[in-house]
Image (tube, grey):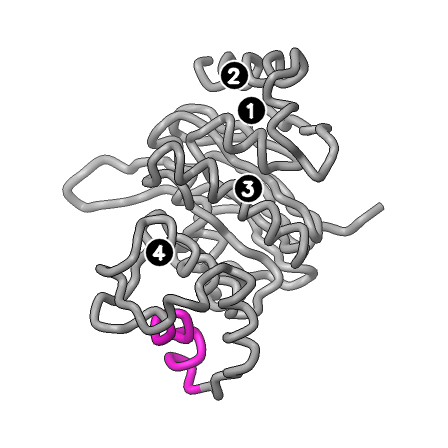
Amino acid sequence: MTEAVLKVQSVTKIFTNSDKPRLKVLDGVSLDLMRNEIVGVIGPSACGKSTLLDCIAGLTGIDQGLIKLESDSIVDVTGKVSYMMQDDVMLPWRNLRQNIILPYTVNDLPVPAEKITALAKLFGLNKFMEYFPAEMSGGMRQRASLLRAYVSGKDVLLLDEPFGKLDAITRYEILHWFLDIWQKKKLSILLVTHDIDEALYLSDRIYVMSAGPGKIISEIKVSFKRPRTDKFIATSEYASLKLKLLKLIAG
């Protein structure tokens, strides 16, 4: 059996504030991610999806449980996974090239110029490297953010609503492009999204979380063959699986 590259075991997270009651956000969450797999996480708003990614990335601690990358615990450890947050977080005073190489500059590492040039071409950004974020479309900024996360060279990539702020047409184009990149690079991706169609189109498996405090209430295998085309969206199997996910989220 294939070993999980990322394993989350019975993770509970409680936020405490002296002025407010204790707030349990995650309640015994367990999931795993296999190598070269895309796993989606969906659930109602405020169910703890983003907090889960923050815990995995080491940006916030946990109260119970374990998070392992390969065989090592990464609880409270940053820099072990790549993380693309909801906002593109592009520094407006830096051009695209300078934003993309941030993982190298902040860690005082030599920049592999040839590698960056090759990846920029693959990501469709090679003609925009001297542009500033304000001069680029939302889709281009999303590509740049994904490339910046990728160049950090980590085995696992966390994506938090990566396409949520794009208009429908741009999102459609980006989803196709994203799958093409994944198929070429075989990344291991944990994807948080509120969009069921997005989760179905991209994922190998989908975890469904309950309303807060968030817990995993179902794991759904998405068995549509790859490479995926738009045709499968019109199938009865797709409609049935989408309805099942909608009912799970609605409770």
Report, in whole angstroms, how far the alpha carbon at label 2 lies from the one at label 3. Answer: 27 Å
Q: Name the residue type under label 1.
A: Ile
**Mark 1, residue position:** 217
Dot 2 and dot 1 residues touching (CB under 8 Å): yes
Q: Name the residue type under label 3.
A: His
Residue at the location (22% across, 59% down)? 134
Residue 102, percent from left and from top: 38, 74
Report, in whole angstroms, how far the alpha carbon at label 2 lies from the one at label 4. Answer: 33 Å
Q: Secondary structure at mark 1?
A: strand
Residue at the location (64% across, 32% down)? 229
**Mark 3, residue position:** 176
Pick whichever, 53 or 93, lies toward us. 93
Q: Secondary structure at mark 2?
A: helix
Res. 141 mark? 4
Residue 67, percent from left and from top: 57, 53
- Magenta region, residue range: 97-108
Residue 249, percent from left and from top: 47, 19
Residue 155's image quarter? bottom right
- Mark 3 or mark 1, which has the lower sequence index? 3
Residue at the location (36% across, 42% down)? 14
Q: Mark 2 or mark 1: which is in front?
A: 2
Res. 248 mark? 2
Pick whichever, 44 or 233, lies toward us. 233
Q: Mark 3 or mark 1: which is in front?
A: 3
